[in-house]
Image (cartoon, helix red, strand yellow):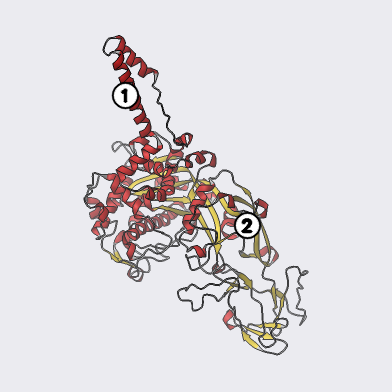
Amino acid sequence: MNRGKRQVLFDYLPGRTFDFAQVGTIASVERVRGTPNPRLNQELVLRAVQQYASAWDEKHRPLLTDRRPDINRFVLLDPKAVQAAMFPLVFHCQNRSCGYVAVRARDTAVMQRTCPRCRQGKMVQLRFIKIHRCGEIQPLTPYCPNCRSGASMALDTRGSERISGFQWKCLTCNTRSAIFAGPCRACNWNDPVPNVVNPRMMDIEVFRSGRTYYAHHVVLLNQPSREMDAFLQIPEWPMLAGAAFFELPEMQGRNLLDFGASALNTPPADVALTNADMDEVLERLNSGQISTAQMATELQEMRARRARQQQASAPSGIAQALLQRTSTSAASWEGAGREMLEAVLPMQSGTVQDLFASPTTGIPLAQQAARQVARDCGIGRLTSVNDFPITTATFAYSRSSYQPDLCRLNLFPADAEHGGRFPIFVDLVQADALVVRLDPERVLRWLERNGLAPTQLFGVPSSQSLPRQAYFVRLFDSVEPAVTLRVQQAQARMVFGLLHTLSHLCVRQAALLCGLDRTSLSEYVLPRTLSFALYSNHRFGATIGALTSLFEQSLEEWLTQVRDSRRCVYDPVCSNNGGTCHACIHLAETSCRFFNLNLSRSFLFGGPEQELSSVSIGYFDPSLALQGAK
């Protein structure tokens, strides 16, 4: 079969069962062959993987510990070919009066098409398999408890299409028994699972059921390795990314990648003066304005001044300035570094159009109207980025569930062809994207109006914008958005829920205007920066410029539709239950990497909320825009 790279990354991964239609066989992927990708920065990919996996307890994510990942244990592969084998090797006769079941070993010769017992029925693969949340998969094989054997068995479907109605029938002693999966023998799962009586028991599923396999992937904005490696060697790189995001004066006109040349961050012991500096001092000496002794003093002071300037513009000086001006610890910046980097790099490396960048006068009426709707929606910045570098990295799988600690996160088997390293399958696409950043002051007003004003900001005036904006960096310390945020994390749930919900509405409305399928667009949420991006997640949509056209031609219409997405076809039932369902907010799993968690229309419009009981004032409430609006 011919399949695209994106299909392989989600649907044809090791351990996945699928219908090999061309030969009429059920098969299981044994291996995905690929070539190493030298363009991507492996450390950034592994950091993203580690952050994703941190939602699981360590015992449920083997080899993905909290320690810094060892890049030598992994290899980034571009998928090239898929190797699969027939699975399961269990066949049963289609003659209902017979139903004979044959189990074959892997090395058995070609299976007979006609039943060897009745000589009439056709032998076909059994479409049911056994799975467990630890990742184990096994064929569903018959067994007679009386004969203690499964050698001579038949399957009686009793006219049912459901496995619960099937029975095993022993052709030797005529004993009948229910189909039973039994406990998993590959693990010793002892953690409780909600609504499951015995979590050690395996489940019986049709081979194509979604519960049999969940691919786990991360999406990140990555740059070619040769340009990023030197920058990542700078100890202060997370704070440099933060300084660039918050536009500190020391970063004006400077690109993050320019710091790579000074990765060692060791200022010279003696600062050399320029020829212009020397000419100025000599001219004053020759004119009699200063003496020889004074000249030595001035040269010394000039060197000291140049040293202070150099130190202030060095990574360590910029980092110190960021710590002081934002009142945020280095540990918080370390945790936020990757998000800051991904928020800044596209703006510095791509072709950017900013809705609010051009002058306020003399602009087209359509752009003026779009600006006004954006302000009404509480958007502080809206940009279109061309050549947006999107890296998808699929690194693990799970079965039975995809939620943290309800399943085990399993790496793909080590690849002997690549030195026994664990493969991470990657795809890099240069796409256009829309990046939306909320107005931080309006978000703070929104929290205050809902009785959740940050106590850390009491006494901090609105004129001190940096500490107020940096509050959101600290807010998400030790917060994992991939799980349900509870009332104990009320402010984090409010802020992330607001971003996540607005992002989903933007994706749904953009798909309608772009003419793309909704599953063709994905979100990328950066909560510490109050930002999210929309991008096309497949190559066709990435190359036709659909989102760029939306930005240039239909921006007002798009934002207006998002602002007016108050209703759901299932209201009032949906709104009374938190305002989140497949008809109004949910996206496909390929579009949302947070499993449709922490969503509610109430964050935008006000109303009942599942964890917080209710949201009094929605973010779109006009009264928020009237206060301090620019």
Residue 557 visible in the picture: no
Which of 289/523 is in front? Answer: 289
> Within 10 Å of the Cα at label 2, are there few (<14), some (14-19), or many (20+) other Cα atoms?
some
Q: Quadrant of residue 83?
A: bottom right
Q: Nearer the viewer, residue 303 or 181?
A: 303
Quadrant where the N terminus sits is bottom right
**How far from the left and from the top, in percent, is residue 84?**
67, 61
Residue pointed to by mark 2: 414
Which quarter of the rendered picture does the C terminus lie within? top left
Q: Which residue corresponds to the image point at 56% horizontal and 49% vertical from the top-left?
A: 71
Viewer-nearest residue: 239 or 606: 239
User: Label 1: which residue?
Assistant: 301
Q: Residue at the location (36% across, 57% down)? A: 496
In the rendering, at what x and y percent does residue 577 appear? Answer: 35, 70
Residue drawn at x 57%, y 81% is 164
Q: Is residue 552 above or below residue 165?
A: above
| Marks 1 and 2, the one that precedes in the sequence | 1
**From what the image shows, is residue 207 above or below residue 30?**
below
Tell me the kind of residue under disc 2: Ala
Disc 1 to disc 2: CB gap under 8 Å: no
What's under tag 1, amino acid-wise?
A: Glu
Taking 129 as reference, is 565 above or below it?
above
